[in-house]
Amino acid sequence: MRPFGSPEQLERRRIRAIELLDSGLQPVEVARTVGVDCRSVRRWQSAYRRQGEESLRAKPASGRPPRLIQDELARLREILLEGAREQGYPTDLWTCPRVADLIKKSFGVGYHVDHIGRLLRSLGFSPQKPQRRAVERNEEEIERWVAADWPRIKKNGAA
């Protein structure tokens, strides 16, 4: 199991352990001080003796390479900002299945629908539900009512 902390924090802990060992503390005392098992301290000490300080450095976390490169992600962001209707959908609502379909058509890369939300968050988008509004809604009449009638009703209600 991976220990808790960023790679930089873990690196600082390993370097601190070696510094404590060099100051004369025993591995058991060092382990108690930095909060690890004694075997870890001995493993770090052995690596330090064989390879020097480089063996204590943080290593980049490996993982699967991204399916879309940075340029493609930037282009995807632009396409999403243009709106869903520009891409031929009947409404301007982006859903995860629509975004997955768009990525497949535009870049030839398949994403599972369940992972689209994470991809969208990495691009700076957040999940939002569109407000439902009646088709018959008259914005001008609403503004007039808020300006003329609402203050009168509000005054009487407060009295």
Image: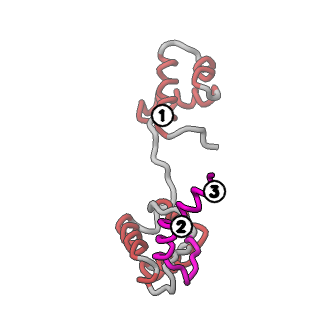
Determine the secondary structure under disc 3: helix
Q: Amino acid at mark 2?
A: Asp
According to the picture, the residue beneath numbered tag 2 turns out to be 149
Q: Secondary structure at mark 1?
A: helix
- Measured from the top left, where is residue 7 in percent x and y? 49, 40
Pointer 3 residue: 157
Dot 2 surroundings within 10 Å: few (below 14), some, or many (20 or more)? few
Q: Residue at x 51, y 29 (%)?
A: 13
Q: Nearer the viewer, residue 129 or 154?
A: 154
Residue drawn at point x = 41 percent, y = 83 percent: 86
Provide the residue span drawn in magenta: 130-159
For residue 132, above or below residue 48: below
Determine whether 117 is above or below 48 in the image: below
- 156 part of magenta stretch: yes
> The disc labelled 3 sits on which kind of residue?
Gly
| Residue at 55% from the left image edge and 14% from the top image edge | 25
Q: Amino acid at mark 1?
A: Glu
Mark positioned earlier in the residue sequence (2 or 1): 1
Residue 3 in the image, given as x and y percentages of width and height: 60, 39
Question: On the image, numbered disc 1 is attached to which residue?
Answer: 11
- Residue 39, by quadrant, is top right
Q: Residues within 10 Å of mark 1 (few under 14, many from 20)?
A: some
